[in-house]
């Protein structure tokens, strides 16, 4: 079984637990909470919690509620992101605020947020030591704070003409990497991992989280439109700054920078996008991002040397490979 199939199976184990926590005695609220889970998703984060637990010799069946907690926190961020981005659809379904209004969308998001911490505390009912649960709670809370900080940084960057590479990498390591890192770390903690295992598995999670975002940025420029489900270069038209753009603005000539600024956030047709991509290739920015992606995957795999060979390790290694190989 490949890594994606294995992770999908593990994610499916958490589905009924997620739905249990997205329940309410109030029929209307119950419907709203259930809707947040209806759009599904890959459930990569809860699957990583379970896999990391198994990788250090723990019993993943005992921490299904903890696996649900990270997905509930992720779901909360999506509900609020949809409001901020004024998105009426997510994965082909109407968003919460599109159905019930912005005010109710905020409240529903907050309710899901509370459920995330409730579910993590409940792993005590499975005999998990209180000190481990407290460490896991601290990890979830830290990831939550980092995600919010990363989101704020991203919003600030939209108004800045130029952003340094270091600031950009810090931003995506928080916005995208923090909850993936937190998922792996929570699994390792609750599975009884050593300090070194917890630390290095956390590093693995952070690396693949950042790598996943860089791959997304590359696919936006080099992917297949049919597989992506959106036009190539759509992020350019929306004015989004990626590692590729940040590198090009730092290393391009004045003429190349002007060309980039003239395209970012503007209405652009296929010809303009092709010209834009040509400029990025001239500067070497696409190749630079590909190299950075490879470095992160090498680093992530090296961190896995701290765990014994076996199926959990193979799954984690396979996920790292998939990030580079994926086409959408």
Image (cartoon, grey):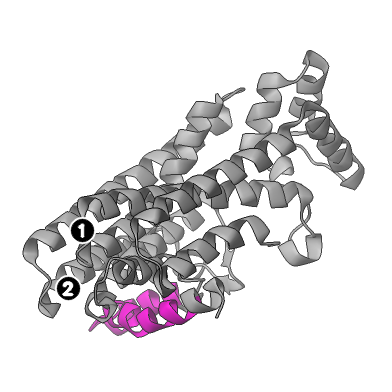
Q: Residue at x 76, y 47 (%)?
A: 221
Residue shown at 42% from the left, 78% from the top: 10
- Residue 307 lies in the magenta stretch: no
Magenta stretch: residue 19 in it?
Answer: yes
Tell me the residue at 9%/67% (across/down): 129
Furthest residue to the left? 130
- Secondary structure beneath label 1: helix
User: Residue 200 or 37: which is nearer the viewer?
Assistant: 200
| Residue at the far top in the pictured view | 254
Query: Could you tell which of marks 1 and 2 lies nearer the N-terminus?
Result: 2
Left or right: residue 153 compared with residue 254:
left
The residue indicated by pointer 2 is 123
Labels 1 & 2 near each other (Cβ < 8 A): yes
Viewer-nearest residue: 193 or 153: 193
Location of residue 138 with respect to 259 vertically, above or below: below
Magenta-drawn segment: 8-37
Query: As displayed, is residue 279 above or below residue 97?
Result: above
Q: Quadrant of the C terminus?
A: bottom right
Q: Residue 198 location, x and y as percent?
A: 27, 54
- Can residue 285 be seen in the rendering of this structure? yes
Q: Can you identify the residue that label 1 sits on?
A: 136
Up/down of 257 relative to 105, above or below? above
Q: Position of residue 92 (x, y in %)?
A: 62, 73
Q: Is residue 140 left or right of residue 99?
A: left
CA–CA distance in space, label 1 to label 2: 10 Å
Compared to residue 9, the image places residue 97 above or below, namely above
Residue occupying image coordinates x 50% and y 27%: 166
Return the mark for residue 97: none
């Amino acid at each position: 079984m490949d890594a994606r199939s294995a992770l999908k199976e593990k994610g499916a184990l958490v589905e009924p637990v997620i739905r249990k926590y997205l329940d309410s005695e109030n029929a209307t609220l119950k419907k709203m909470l259930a809707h947040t889970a209806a759009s599904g998703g890959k459930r990569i984060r809860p699957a990583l919690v379970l896999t990391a637990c198994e990788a250090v010799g723990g019993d993943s069946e005992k921490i299904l509620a903890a696996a649900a907690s990270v997905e509930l926190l992720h779901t909360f961020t999506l509900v609020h992101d949809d409001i901020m981005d004024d998105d009426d659809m997510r994965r082909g379904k109407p968003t919460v605020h599109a159905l019930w209004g912005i005010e109710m969308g905020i409240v529903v998001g907050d309710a899901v947020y509370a459920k995330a911490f409730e579910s993590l505390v409940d792993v005590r009912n499975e005999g998990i030591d209180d000190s481990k649960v407290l460490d896991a709670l601290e990890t979830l809370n830290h990831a939550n704070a980092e995600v919010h900080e990363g989101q704020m940084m991203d919003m600030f960057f939209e108004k800045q003409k130029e952003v340094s590479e270091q600031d950009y990498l810090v931003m995506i390591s928080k916005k995208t990497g923090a909850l993936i890192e937190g998922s792996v770390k929570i699994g390792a903690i609750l599975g009884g991992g050593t300090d070194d295992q917890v630390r290095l598995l956390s590093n693995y999670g952070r690396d693949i989280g950042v790598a996943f975002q860089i791959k997304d940025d590359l696919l936006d420029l080099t992917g297949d439109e049919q597989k992506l489900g959106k036009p190539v270069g759509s992020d350019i038209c929306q004015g989004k700054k990626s590692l590729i753009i940040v590198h090009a603005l730092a290393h391009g000539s004045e003429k190349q920078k002007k060309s980039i600024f003239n395209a970012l956030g503007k209405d652009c047709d296929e010809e303009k996008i092709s010209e834009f991509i040509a400029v990025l290739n001239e500067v070497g920015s696409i190749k630079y991002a590909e190299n950075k992606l490879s470095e992160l995957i090498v680093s992530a795999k090296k961190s896995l040397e701290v765990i014994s060979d076996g199926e959990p390790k193979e799954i984690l290694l396979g996920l790292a490979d998939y990030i580079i190989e994926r086409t959408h």
